[in-house]
């Protein structure tokens, strides 16, 4: 006697007329990834990110923001230092070893050049809440913010990390943003309590992992350096391993947010990857 599954298979086979496309997984809805210039910076002492190595040497860095076009809407990943820095002729000096930032372009201006308004952005996610990543969150006051609960609730001497009125989804772990597996937030604590990275599976280019500050420069990932200002060493090392596993599993490229030599090799908005 035929099993129920076999009967269903034969019935469906006839009904679909052998149309293989219908039997495949749903099409990924992600269409484009834009890399947006969100500034350049100089860290006064590289060894903040490479403890014991290159002590006292300055480090040239960059800051990237990213825009994702998905069939269901637009998403922004990381917002850089505040656009106000573009109006400061000498940029904004860092404090306590943090980098000195300069901006030649604004996030608001780059979005406008693509014909978008802030209200067109459906989702906004930040890797973590350091000032060089959340500087322009309030450019998008109506956009749903996707952030780890551990980051949102992390006490700050300066008060709440986000405006309490900002719409938010507090995540507890990984999150499939559009429900089709094409854009996934992955929890990677260590740099901060609720740090997260973003895996984007582009239909033509392939998979890209956007690092946030889980990795600062290529060298830190290769040598598994734990920056001196990270909140948790063990979590940092586990997150490095998680990232390495994801890169292998998805044959993904690692795009490191602050890595200046790498950004020099990337196409910047209005160009895009698809
Ligand atoms: Zn940063």
Image (cartoon, grey):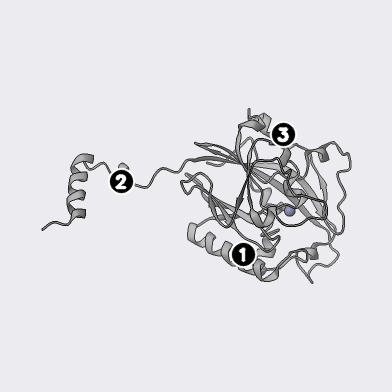
Q: Residue at x 89, y 43 (%)?
A: 90
Q: Is mark 2 on a helix, strand or loop?
A: helix
How far apart in space, not on screen, are marks 3 and 2 (Cα)?
42 Å
Q: Where is residue 74 in the image (x, y as percent from the top left)?
A: 58, 37
Q: Is residue 29 above or below residue 240?
A: above
Q: Position of residue 179 (x, y in %)?
A: 48, 46
Which residue in the protein does label 1 denote?
Answer: 239
Callout 1 environment at 10 Å: few (<14), some (14 to 19), or many (20+)? many
Which residue in the protein does label 2 denote?
Answer: 23
Q: Position of residue 210 (x, y in %)?
A: 61, 52
Q: Which mark is residue 108?
A: 3
Horizontal relation, residue 100 to residue 168: left or right: right
Front residue of 71 and 216:
71
Q: Is residue 267 visible?
A: no
* Residue at the far top in the pictured view: 115
Callout 2 environment at 10 Å: few (<14), some (14 to 19), or many (20+)? few
Label 2 close to label 1 by CB (< 8 Å): no
Q: Is residue 158 above or below residue 71?
A: below
Quadrant in the picture for residue 270: top right
Q: Which residue is drawn at 17% across and 51% down?
A: 7
Q: In this view, does 62 lie above or below 59?
A: above
Quadrant in the picture for residue 34: top right
Q: Which of marks 3 and 1 is nearer the N terminus?
A: 3
Q: Which residue is drawn at 77% across and 63% down?
A: 229
Q: Earlier in the sequence, mark 2 or mark 1?
A: 2
């Amino acid at each position: 006697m035929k099993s129920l599954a076999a009967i269903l298979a034969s019935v469906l086979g006839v009904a679909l007329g052998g149309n293989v496309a219908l039997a495949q997984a749903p099409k990924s809805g992600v269409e484009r990834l834009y890399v947006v210039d969100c500034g350049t910076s100089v860290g006064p002492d590289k060894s903040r990110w490479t403890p014991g190595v290159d002590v006292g040497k300055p480090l040239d860095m960059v800051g990237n923001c990213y825009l994702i076009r998905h069939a269901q809407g637009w998403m922004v990943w990381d917002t850089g230092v505040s656009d106000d820095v573009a109006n400061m002729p000498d940029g904004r000096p860092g404090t306590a070893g943090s980098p000195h930032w300069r901006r030649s372009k604004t996030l608001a201006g780059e979005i406008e050049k693509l014909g978008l308004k802030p209200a067109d952005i459906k989702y906004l996610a930040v890797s973590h809440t350091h000032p060089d990543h959340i500087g322009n969150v309030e450019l998008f006051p109506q956009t749903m913010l996707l952030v780890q609960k551990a980051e949102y609730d992390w006490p700050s001497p300066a008060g709440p990390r986000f405006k309490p009125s900002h719409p938010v989804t507090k995540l507890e772990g990984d999150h499939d943003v559009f429900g089709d597996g094409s854009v996934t937030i992955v929890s990677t604590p260590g740099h901060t309590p609720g740090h997260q990275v973003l895996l984007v599976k582009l239909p033509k280019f392939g998979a890209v992992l956007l690092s946030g500050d889980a990795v600062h420069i290529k060298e830190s990932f290769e040598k598994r350096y734990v920056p001196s200002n990270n909140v948790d060493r063990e979590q940092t090392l586990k997150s490095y391993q998680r990232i390495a596993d994801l890169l292998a599993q998805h044959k993904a490229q690692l795009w490191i947010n602050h890595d200046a030599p790498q950004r020099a090799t990337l196409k910047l908005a209005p160009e895009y990857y698809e």
